């Protein structure tokens, strides 16, 4: 089944639930195209997290990046339990300077429901980013219904 159709079906399924988060496992970039297409069709904001945070944190002391990131993203995300946005290019969230538990951070934003393009891979219900020996490594479990792969 075409990825954009799978995403659209999930949106319908969860559309009446407030503040849901779906993770689109996207190691090769096909999910970004599908999400951009769907966002255009449905008028869903497509947030390039890396660009937004890089611009906003440029003059902020690195020690405060993780704290400031919440405020920055809440300012650009639509507000409301039944609003939806795509959160793409989240690589910056994994940097050691951010000092974040990325899944807790994303799910704690609670500004709106999110379709998150996960830039790593999934195995047995766990999401991975990077390699275990790297400082930006992340491994976390999510609920099976939150995964789109």
Image: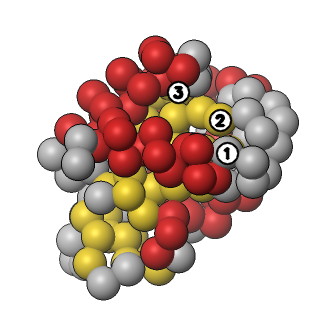
Q: Is residue 135 left or right of residue 7?
A: left
C-beta proximity under 8 Å, tags 2 and 1? yes
Few, some or many residues within 10 Å of mark 2 (<14, 14–19, 20+): many
Q: Is residue 66 left or right of residue 75?
A: left
Q: Secondary structure at mark 2?
A: strand
- Count of labels in the image: 3
Please give the residue where the numbered disc 2 appears in the rendered image: 84
- Comparing 10 with 137, the one in front is 10
Name the quadrant of the C terminus.
Answer: bottom left
Q: Which mark is residue 47?
A: 3
**x 46%, y 17%: residue:** 41
C-beta proximity under 8 Å, tags 3 and 1? no
Could one spot residue 74 in this view of the protein?
Answer: no
Q: Say above or below: 134 vs 113.
A: below
Q: Give residue 117's position: percent from left, percent from top.
A: 40, 45
Q: Say above or below: 17 vs 2.
A: below
Could one spot residue 112 in this view of the protein?
Answer: yes
Q: CA distance from mark 3 to mark 1?
A: 19 Å
**x 55%, y 44%: residue:** 11
Q: Secondary structure at mark 1?
A: loop
- Comparing 84 with 61, the one in front is 84
Q: Secondary structure at mark 3?
A: strand
Please give the residue where the numbered disc 1 appears in the rendered image: 15
Q: CA distance from mark 3 to mark 2?
A: 11 Å
Q: Say above or below: 83 vs 41.
A: below
Q: CA distance from mark 2 to mark 1?
A: 9 Å
Q: Nearest to the eye among marks 3 and 1: give it.
A: 1
**x 42%, y 63%: residue:** 147
Q: Earlier in the sequence, mark 3 or mark 1?
A: 1
Q: Give residue 22's position: percent from left, percent from top.
A: 52, 55
């Amino acid at each position: 089944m075409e990825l954009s159709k799978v995403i659209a079906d999930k949106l319908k399924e969860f559309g009446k639930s407030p503040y849901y988060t779906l993770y689109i496992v996207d190691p090769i970039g096909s999910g970004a195209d599908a999400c951009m297409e769907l966002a255009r069709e449905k008028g869903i904001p497509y947030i390039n997290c890396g660009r937004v945070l890089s611009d906003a944190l440029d003059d902020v002391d690195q020690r405060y990046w993780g704290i400031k990131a919440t405020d920055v993203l809440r300012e650009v995300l639509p507000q409301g339990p039944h609003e939806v946005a795509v959160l793409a290019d989240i690589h910056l969230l994994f940097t050691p300077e951010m000092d974040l538990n990325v899944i807790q951070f994303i799910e704690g934003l609670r500004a709106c429901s999110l379709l998150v393009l996960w830039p790593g891979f999934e195995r047995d219900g766990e999401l991975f980013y990077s390699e275990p020996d790297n400082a930006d490594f992340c491994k976390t479990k999510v609920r099976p219904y939150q995964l789109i792969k």
